[in-house]
Amino acid sequence: MAPCNAANRAGLRPQGEAMLAGDFERKLQKLNKDLKIFCGNDDSKPAGIFHVVNGEYTEICGIDKGYVSEYSFVRSDGIIIRSGWRRALKILLGKGLISRYKAERIFNTYLGYSQKRKPIPTKKETVSSFGLPVMERGAFQ
């Protein structure tokens, strides 16, 4: 499966698992029936993922027509040339529109997780051998 002509001219090659936009949309439909991909064939909506509720369209993020690579292609100045499906999934996870477990199972990938960090103890606190903060005597006075 060859990438689009613009990516060929830019010297970009697909990285990771690539899929057609139709396959990507079918997988998204398994995660949330209200998600749709519009290819920008008409002037009413740009190419991207939309959340459709009661006939109202809310744009989530842009996605390329036809061919969706796993990772995004980014220029050296930070501008996204091609959006990857991993980026789209992380945006959908952040908005709470899909579940991480189902997305990892359907797309057969690991999307990572964010672990909350423990706060750094202040001068008045010390850390016990169990990793719990212990207040010094007189700290509450």
Image (cartoon, rainbow, N blue to C red):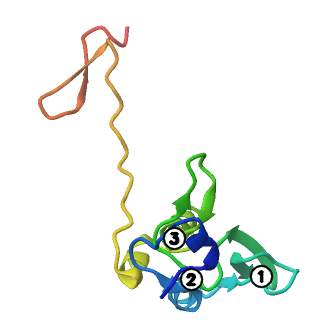
Q: Earlier in the sequence, mark 3 or mark 1?
A: 1
To which quarter of the image does residue 59 belong? bottom right
For the C terminus, the quadrant is top left
Residue lying at 30% horizontally and 8% vertically, measured from the top left? 138
To which quarter of the image does residue 103 belong? bottom left
Residue 89 - label: 3
**Closer to viewer: mark 2 or mark 1:** 2
Residue lying at 35% horizontally and 40% vertically, measured from the top left? 117
Decide which of 115, 27 is in the foreground and name it.
27
Q: Earlier in the sequence, mark 2 or mark 1?
A: 1
Decide which of 77, 134 is in the foreground and name it.
77
Crowd tier of the residue under label 3, counting other residues whose Cα lies within 10 Å: few below 14, some 14–19, many 20 or above: many
* Kind of residue at badge 3: Leu
User: Left or right: 11 with respect to 48?
Assistant: left
User: Left or right: 4 with respect to 125?
Assistant: right
Residue 67 - label: 2
* Kind of residue at badge 1: Gly
User: Left or right: 41 with respect to 5?
Assistant: right
Residue lying at 58% horizontally and 86% vertically, measured from the top left? 21
* Kind of residue at badge 2: Tyr
Question: Which element type, helix, strand or loop, lies under badge 2?
Answer: strand
Gap in Å between the C-alphas at discs 2 and 1? 14 Å
